[in-house]
Image (cartoon, helix red, strand yellow):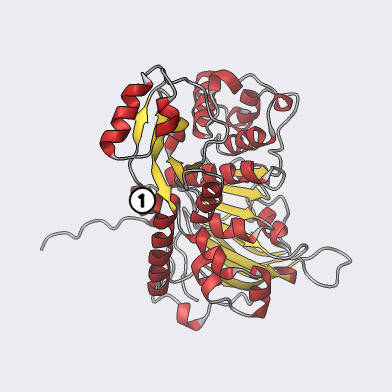
Amino acid sequence: MSESAPTSTPEQLRHAEGITGASILLDKVTKRYPGQAKPAVDGLTLEIPAGKMVMFVGPSGCGKTTTLKMINRLIEPTEGRIVLNGEDVTKKDGDQLRRKIGYVIQAGGLFPHMTVAANIAIVPKMLGWDKERIAARVDELLELVSLDPGVYRNRFPKELSGGQQQRVGVARALAADPPVLLMDEPFGAVDPITRQRLQDELLQIQADLQKTIVCVTHDFDEAVKLGDWIAIFDEGARLVQYDTPERILGDPANEFVENFIGSGAGLKQLTLTRVGDAPLAAAVTGRPGEAAADVLERVKTAGHGHAVIVDARQRPLQWLSRRQLSRLQTISPVLDPKLPVVGSRATLNDALDTMLVSSAGAALVTGRRDAFEGVIDVQTVMAAITKAHEAAAMDSMDAPVGTNTGAIPAAAEPAEPLAAGEGRTGQ
């Protein structure tokens, strides 16, 4: 009789799938503050799957930030357990735990007297990394968040825009390659355009790294755009609904959720599909320094109306019509500040917003390192919306467990005891 093949552990399976995050289980967690009649968090059991992004939303004072901070024990729970990758970390040294969990707050929370590099290097230094390894990691992370290391490494926070500070804050949180990233209103202090770009950047980073990310936000549209799962809380961190964005929009659990979603739930469906999931049209491209007549000839041969001018790194600079090309002799390297560009991880809603300001009635799509990938138009968006609705109707994926009773529903009980690092699933 042949020997059976060795069984892979849940952790080995996660790494094989490219997941670098860790599962989290809040097990009957309660937080009481002296002098308060009701707990801030009351008997919360919440399963957060490894490699997923979970959004905490709810009215002010509902306990979502308290719940977030109990995961890394910035706030100590009064009762219950916090289980990280199968290990109960409730009694573990809090400082040691926090060095293994990234934390991002509003406006980045950078130390103003330290350079960008020094800010990012804080945790690796605490962990005893050598200078060469730290320097390499700093440059790697700056590239990851789309900041040129040569330009930004030695700058101070006051020399950065709000969006750049937030990018450095994310880089710092990822410095020691933690399995878990906690984010508390990370994009709340920036303007709407920068906010969209930071959201897209986070989605791209998550697609590459597959960390476990828990994010508190007051913006339901942001939760729909970013979250694999959304936890909607009421007062006392009472979990009202914990589900996918698609099912929360399509089948809210009760009137509280309906009111929280607000009007325009149909329009919010636009945030459920990424630009990169829609088919993109090809475009004629040109380079600065080329003869405009040559580019125009390629545009006419292809039957297109425009040419996308890209730099040496394939980043779009201009989107020139036939008329514009006919008036030029040589293509300039000037960047058009009004270029209608949207990232591949942006939503169809973002794409439509961008198209509204485009004379071409379409938008240029960029991917990794802002490289041009193709063109998206209104017709493509409408077709993608129809496809998304059909896919959502067929979705039967089980949600992770979320309850305030501390008990697992009978239908969700596993047939066998849970192995370390595994979670229960069910409604």
Above or below — where is 185 with respect to 301?
below
Q: Residue 170, position in %: x, y? A: 60, 39
Asked which secondary structure carries label 1, the reply is: helix
Q: Residue furthest bottom?
A: 410
Q: Quadrant of residue 163?
A: top right
Q: In the image shown, does 387 or 152 lie closer to the viewer? A: 387
Residue at figure coordinates x 46%, y 53% from the top left: 51
**Image label count:** 1
Tell me the residue that label 1 is attached to: 12
Q: Quadrant of residue 382?
A: bottom left
Residue at figure coordinates x 67%, y 50% from the top left: 184
Q: Determine if residue 98 is in view.
A: no
Is 76 placed left or right of 176 in the picture?
A: right
Above or below — where is 124 with respect to 75?
above
Q: Determine if residue 1 is in view.
A: yes
Q: Residue furthest left?
A: 1
Residue at figure coordinates x 58%, y 42% from the top left: 198
Q: Residue 62, position in %: x, y? A: 74, 66
Q: In the image shown, does 114 or 189 lie closer to the viewer? A: 189
Q: Residue 72, position in %: x, y? A: 64, 50
- Amino acid type indicated by mark 1: Gln
Residue at figure coordinates x 89%, y 66% from the top left: 35
Above or below — where is 108 with respect to 87?
above
Is 308 placed left or right of 346 in the picture?
A: left
Few, some or many C-alpha atoms within 10 Å of disc 1 (few <14, some 14-19, many ≥20)?
few
Is 232 placed left or right of 113 in the picture?
A: left
Quadrant of image for the N terminus: bottom left
Q: Residue 50, position in %: x, y? A: 47, 55
